[in-house]
Image (cartoon, rainbow, N blue to C red):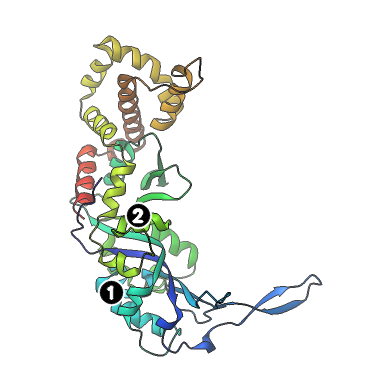
Amino acid sequence: MKYSKLQAENQFDTLRLQVPADIMPEPNWNNFTYSDTFISATGDMEKKATDVHTLKTKHKGITCWYVDKKTPLEKPKFDMIISAKVLKDEYYKGISRDTIKRLGLELQASGITDDEIDMSEFLQHSQVLRADNTFNIKVDEPDIQTYYDSLDIVISQGKRGKIQTYEQEGSCNGIVIGKDTKVVQKITIYNKLDEARQLLKEKYPYHRIDDSAELEYGMKWADFHTYFADKLRVELRIMDWDKLRKFYTNRKSGIVTLEDLIFSENNAILYQWRQFVNEGHTKEALNFLDMSFTEKRNYKTNSYSAAANWALLKQFVKVFDGNEKKVTEKIQKIYYVDPKTTKYKKISPSVRKDITRFCAEWRENKLKSKRGELFKSNLTGKYQEIDKKISNL
């Protein structure tokens, strides 16, 4: 599968970097620790010299360690975790081409060095170990809740797909789409305002939200709310070097630098979206949900195949609460095992499609029962809007 060209500039919420020590001019060593405090076997507090020196100064959005060389072949380096919170009033922009200069000023202000940092050198030589590629997608309608509902109901995963839903007060406000693999592979789509409210409440219980938002994000709450109120936060987390290289470069080997990520034109989020979301299954769900109540009822009775599938599947759809993956696995274990080899056989296409249809309908009816008059229709249209906007990032 080829990468689509990114229309917007790449932006990142969090980065884990290793920066060669010679990139940072004249580090301020007084701001780093040179020993660790620990409790000895006798219970006394003792100090021990360490090769890893932690930046003592507190600066929002920057955590930094100086790692001395441990062998003659190693070179000293700075290990950093940088969050877009370092940008303060420009937090919403993320770490991007437009905010690199601001990032350099904040790195200097953090106390790592007193001198100006050459950000061109910083970009070229900083190795990326982990990245959260993040975009804020503006939606067409003000009721943003219905967009999360559409994802919760419509989206369908493949064989190794993994979907997790986050709820707050009975409403879906975030969904994680990924794969069951050893290395974390996931896209998270969530409501940034809900996340912020929960975080601020827990972290600053005695502050007004206006004050706590500025402490945490460097933005006034009114500005923060205005910006994120009509946007879906879409985040791709990459924690694997090979994936970073594959998503953001055309190379087969070598390190991945911050310059590679910032200036990449690959739409990595769309690529993974197409990997995680089974397009064919999802289309089946969309088509079925667009039917009227009478059309759905007739579908289940007008053909022998559909009637037989409904009779077989309805109990499992109910037991597993519309979880398509669990229903599929159970049906395969019971009805699609080769008695000679004990290996699983391929599920009949008609059964597989009906699992998708009936599970989507169950999730829709469950949401209707929760919301009552608050339930909004045209969820399939909302899903298609999200899919299109991810394609056009």
Q: Is residue 237 above or below residue 109?
A: above
- Depth check: give the residue in front, 230 or 329: 329
Q: Which mark is residue 160?
A: none
Specify whether 269 is left or right of 48. Answer: left
Residue bearing mark 2: 236
Residue bearing mark 1: 99
Quadrant of the drawing holding the C terminus: bottom left
- Depth check: give the residue in front, 152 or 131: 131
Q: Residue at x 20, y 61 (%)?
A: 8
Q: Is residue 163 above or below residue 346?
A: below
Q: Residue at x 29, y 52 (%)?
A: 269
Whether tag 1 and tag 2 are in contact, CB under 8 A, the answer is no
List x then y, in percent, for residue 87. Answer: 34, 74
Q: Is residue 164 above or below residue 52?
A: above
List x then y, in percent, for residue 252. Answer: 34, 57
List x then y, in percent, for residue 98. Answer: 24, 73
Quadrant of the drawing holding the N terminus: top left
**Label 1: which secondary element:** helix
**Label 2: which secondary element:** strand
Specify whether 329 is left or right of 228. Answer: right
Callout 1, which amino acid? Thr
Callout 2, which amino acid? Leu
Circle nearer the N terminus (1, 2): 1
